[in-house]
């Protein structure tokens, strides 16, 4: 076994668990799995990681290695743990690190190169994607974690974590005709007050729109209502508590006039946000400017597309759901809702005091409700719209106004009435593509286009 140049053995020890104390991550967990593989030691060395579904696989053209890595920042601030990478040893004796491959940003994929390029952020989960065409035809014998610090850092102790570890065909990239396809609205949401990647919400909205629409994992706050990872449940999954109408300029200033809509498939119309919450995987989300869609763990499908002053919601209830309810709620008791004459109406007046004014709403369902009334648990002003057990899909058209209920109804007539979900989404898509097309780039990689249009999307949301 090699030494680190100071007479000590160079080695990597593999643990199971997860980082503790990260500003944006769940303690003791991986990035997507309940636990991660830990690496710790000193000096340049490699150690195998038991990833059985990868071992024995023959690399094909178009395959990609993807993993998440969390290098811990050492007390001496040497960043030695960032000189690490997942490597592949092939049955012919070669390694992926011998092939001079790069990640999605053109940075070296090998451990030493990643350290030199300073591409990995310490105390954060980093996404690494490596194209494997250079290794096509070779068969994987081992998956390794390799640490290769410079000579000056061979004596430094390090610790880090690895999760995800996927090897397979890279997903198809957008063809460029739909620039919305390059925008992931969740970009900037894996953040907190302790570490900012933008502290953004995953906003679906009309450009410069009157309302934002955002999924919320915490329906009780006007600061950080959507947390990508830090607030995950015991299975390391986020939980949806609703889809909110939002007007948040930033978490520091706070949101205002949040109106929250949440389908519930439980037998009772659960009103408490924590009780009605349902887990989901980020892989089951589509988060774009023109649409947000998620499939929940209980089989319920949620989809929303924006207009300027409103939105169209589609809720799909699986046949085995014990109940069919749509909860209308807000973050506190400053709101009121009623159902009469085929429409749900109400108002909310909550959140940050800066620039706040009462917001009114008017909405219609495409299925006649079987009941309307208080929720079981939750806030006293929350209301549940209940549908017959045979109902499999419910569409809600809902518009808002700062003037009054009549104006909200007028906005619904102007923007939502007689228009189906696909038509409303297509209108938003065309508008976004027109706005995003102010910048075109020849020869840019898909990763760079995602950066470009993901950044451009944010200022197009404002002013509003």
Image (cartoon, rainbow, N blue to C red):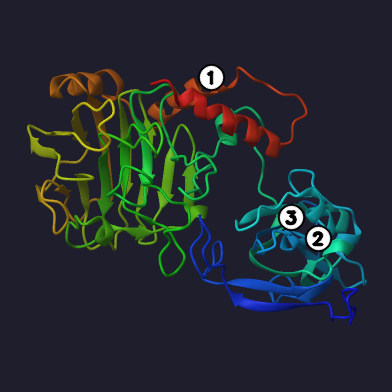
Q: At 38% across and 23% down in the image, what residue appears?
A: 209
What percent of the width, then of the height, locates residue 252?
39, 38
> Can you say which quadrant of the picture contains the C terminus?
top left
**Which tag is nearer the camera, tag 2 or tag 1?**
2
Q: Are marks 2 and 1 in contact (CB under 8 Å)?
A: no
Confirm whether residue 95 shows in the render: yes
Q: Which residue is mark 1?
A: 435
Secondary structure category for the residue under label 2: helix
Badge 3: how crowded within 10 Å, few (<14), some, or many (20+)?
A: many
Badge 1: how crowded within 10 Å, few (<14), some, or many (20+)?
A: some
- For the residues labelled 3 and 2, the Cα–Cα distance comes to 17 Å
Secondary structure category for the residue under label 1: helix
Q: Which mark is residue 379?
A: none
Nearest to the observer: residue 429 or residue 330: 330
Nearest to the observer: residue 86 or residue 124: 124
- For the residues labelled 1 and 3, the Cα–Cα distance comes to 32 Å
Q: Which residue is mark 3?
A: 64
What percent of the width, then of the height, locates residue 350?
21, 37
With 49 as the anchor, is 427 left or right in this view?
Answer: left
**Which tag is nearer the camera, tag 1 or tag 3?**
1
Outermost residue to the front: 76
Nearest to the observer: residue 36 or residue 282: 36
Q: Which residue is mark 2?
A: 111
């Amino acid at each position: 076994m090699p030494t680190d140049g100071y007479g000590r053995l160079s080695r990597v020890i593999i643990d199971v668990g997860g980082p503790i104390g990260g500003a944006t991550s769940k303690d003791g967990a991986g990035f997507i799995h309940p636990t991660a593989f830990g690496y710790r030691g000193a000096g340049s060395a490699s150690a195998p990681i038991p990833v059985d579904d990868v071992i024995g696989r023959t690399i094909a053209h178009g395959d990609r290695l993807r993993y998440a890595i969390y290098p811990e920042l050492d007390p001496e601030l040497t960043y030695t743990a960032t000189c690490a990478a997942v490597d592949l040893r092939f049955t012919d004796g070669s390694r992926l690190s011998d092939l001079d491959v790069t990640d999605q940003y053109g940075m070296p994929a090998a451990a030493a190169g990643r350290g030199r390029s300073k591409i990995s952020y310490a105390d954060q989960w980093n996404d690494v994607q490596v194209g494997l065409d250079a290794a096509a035809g070779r068969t994987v014998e081992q998956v390794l974690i390799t640490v290769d610090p410079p000579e000056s850092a061979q004596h430094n102790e390090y610790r880090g974590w690895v999760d995800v570890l996927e090897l397979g065909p890279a997903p198809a990239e957008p063809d460029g005709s739909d620039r919305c396809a390059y925008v992931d609205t969740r970009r900037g949401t894996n953040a907190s007050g302790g570490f900012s990647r933008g502290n953004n919400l995953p906003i679906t909205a009309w450009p410069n729109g009157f309302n934002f629409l955002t999924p919320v994992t915490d329906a009780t706050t006007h600061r950080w209502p959507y947390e990508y990872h830090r607030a995950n449940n015991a299975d390391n999954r986020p939980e949806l508590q609703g889809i909110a109408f939002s007007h948040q300029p930033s978490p520091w200033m706070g949101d205002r006039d949040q109106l929250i809509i949440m389908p519930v498939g439980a037998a009772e119309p659960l009103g408490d946000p924590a009780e009605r919450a349902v887990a989901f995987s980020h892989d089951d989300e589509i988060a774009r400017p023109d649409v947000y869609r998620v499939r929940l763990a209980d089989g319920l499908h949620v989809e929303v597309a924006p207009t300027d002053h409103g939105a169209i919601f589609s809720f799909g209830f699986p046949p085995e759901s014990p109940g069919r309810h749509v909860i209308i709620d807000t973050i506190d008791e400053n709101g009121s809702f009623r159902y009469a004459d085929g429409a749900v109406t109400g108002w909310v007046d909550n959140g940050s005091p800066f620039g706040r004014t009462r917001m009114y709403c008017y909405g219609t369902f495409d299925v006649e409700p079987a009941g309307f009334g208080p929720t079981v648990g939750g806030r006293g002003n929350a209301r549940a719209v209940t549908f017959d057990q045979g109902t499999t899909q419910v569409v809600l058209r809902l518009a808002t106004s700062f003037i009054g209920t009549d104006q909200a109804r007028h906005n619904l007539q102007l923007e939502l009435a007689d228009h189906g979900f696909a038509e409303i989404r297509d209108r938003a898509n065309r508008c976004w593509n027109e706005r995003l097309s102010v910048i075109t780039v020849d020869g840019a990689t898909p990763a760079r286009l995602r950066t470009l249009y993901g950044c451009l999307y944010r200022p197009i949301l404002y002013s509003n």
